[in-house]
Amino acid sequence: MKDLIDIPAVMAQIGADAKAAAAELAFATAERKHAALISAAEHVWASRADIIAANAKDLEFGRDKGLSPAMMDRLTLDEDRIRGIVDGLRAVAEQPDPVGAVLAEWDQPNGLNIKRVRTPLGVIGVIYESRPNVTADAGALCLKSGNAVILQGTVSARYGAAPLLPRPNGLLTCWRVSYPSARRESRGQKHPVRPRPRRRGGKNGYGRWHYRRSR
């Protein structure tokens, strides 16, 4: 598989596409983002049968790979969990638009008025494990805040997570199924758009990695 994937080229193309989308998303109106998220919620609920069927492939793959019961539970999608995803999308849609919010304002002695205003970051990279719901959650939060997002999940969730991507016009969400060898090759490589991806996670994983390097 390593011979079939040009990792630097794939990363460069995904980054370039995300950067182009970010330029449009930064100026998307609150009304447009709200409508996009409501549309995404409706689409996920209408597609729940297909999502559950796709998730069944992930569960079969997980059993074959010997995933632990806890990991299998994290991977599982049913109608109740999809309802939770839909409710989450709607909840994000109804939140106040953060873009353009004035955090502080003051006048200088010379009469100059200064404002501290919330603005989009641009392109956000999210790395996560076997939680298909993170696909919708991360996509929704990034859209609401006017950011493009590059999502990198695990192979174990490749079937069930992809249909959860909110794909309204102007939102770029890149679902990249990375095989282990490809992920190892891509780590540490310079990225033309995301030179310093920020990691998160539990105290025994990415959280500890980030804590050691941010002190």
Image: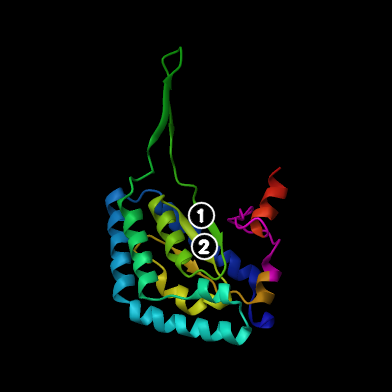
Q: Of the residues shown, which amino acid type is indicated by label 1?
A: Val
Of residues 113 and 85, the one drawn nearer to the viewer in this rendering: 85
Q: Give the image quarter of residue 195.
A: bottom right
Q: Of the residues shown, which amino acid type is indicated by label 2?
A: Ile
Quarter in which the N terminus is drawn:
bottom right
**Residue drawn at x 53%, y 61% as measured from the top left:** 16
Residue 94 located left or right of residue 59: left
* Lower sequence index among marks 1 and 2: 1
Q: Give the image quarter of residue 62.
A: bottom right
Are the residues flagged by discs 1 and 2 in contact, CB closer than 8 Å?
A: yes
Residue numbers of the magenta segment: 184-204
Residue 208 located left or right of residue 128: right
Which residue carries the number 1 mark? Answer: 123
Main SS, magenta residues: loop
CA gap, disc 1 and disc 2: 7 Å
Is residue 41 shown in magenta?
no
Of residues 8 and 176, the one drawn nearer to the viewer in this rendering: 176
Is residue 185 shown in magenta?
yes
**Residue drawn at x 43%, y 28% as measured from the top left:** 104
